[in-house]
Amino acid sequence: MKTIYFVRHGQSTGNIAPVYQAVDVPLTEAGKKQAQYVAERCAKLPIEVVVSSTQTRARETALIIAAETGHEVEFSDLFRERRKPSELNGKPFGDPEAERLNDKWWRSLMGKGPRALDGEAFEDLSARAGEALTYLIKRKEDNILVVTHGFYMRYLVARAIYGDALNGENFEPLARSLVMENTGITVLRHDASTPKQAWGEPAPWQFWIWNDHSHLG
């Protein structure tokens, strides 16, 4: 049985500013405290390796966790947040032009419209999430901690549930309803020894825990 502990990064400056979050923003002081709280909790888990998104807010969170658990961190772009159109970065909420672009981007993220400039679209993120899950399955460790991002985590879970059958129609309800606290823990399990299902498909991932943030009180 392989167990993957996904941790969303701590609160970032981009999470609290009234703008579309830039690509690389650091943790706030509150975010660093959140990371320390989850690090102390992770030290009690049987993790063998820490893998992290390359983005600053995730890197900082992962390094705080690793300092507590005694692991080195491996960084991977497979676990970065969805890439927004670069023209949105730092634009204030409520700006009419930014709102139009964000609406177009949302539609592309749900598979309902064309790509919004250089932003990632549904097909990009679904494929990346599938690649990320395969990467985790193939790793030799049975207990892996991954520091990633809130919205991308929804693609990971959806891909685990639906596999290649994931599409915009079955993803959108999850995208709208699955929300995460900063440093919330989500757990997926996968047992490669489980026999194939009756229709010949590999055994599904087990969606074990979503957004456990009890360490925040």
Image: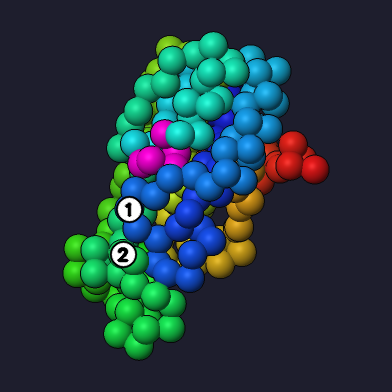
Classify residue 117 by image quadrant: bottom left
Left or right? Give the position of 59 relative to 77.
right
Image spot of residue 103 (x, y percent): 37, 79
**In this figure, which residue is indicated by the disc labeled 2?**
89
> What is the number of the mark on residue 23?
1
Left or right? Give the position of 212 relative to 145.
right
Q: Is residue 154 above or below residue 103?
A: above
At 24% across and 69% down in the image, what residue appears? 87
Q: Quadrant of the C terminus?
A: top right
Q: Is residue 99 above or below residue 21?
A: below
At 39% across and 37% down in the image, what residue appears? 53
* The stretch drawn in magenta includes residue 75: no
User: In the current view of this chain or complex, which residue is farthest to the right?
Assistant: 217
Q: Please state the extent of the stretch shown in magenta in the rendering.
A: 55-59
Q: Amino acid at mark 1?
A: Val
* The stretch drawn in magenta includes residue 56: yes
**Is 27 in front, or is 165?**
27
Image spot of residue 170 (x, y percent): 49, 63
Type of secondary structure dominating the magenta stretch: helix
For mark 2, does the 10 Å Cα neighbourhood hold few (<14), some (14 to 19), or many (20 or more) residues?
some
Number of numbered labels in the structure image: 2
* For marks 1 and 2 on the same chain, the one whose residue lies earlier in the sequence: 1
**Is 140 in front, or is 22?**
22
Q: Amino acid at mark 2?
A: Asn
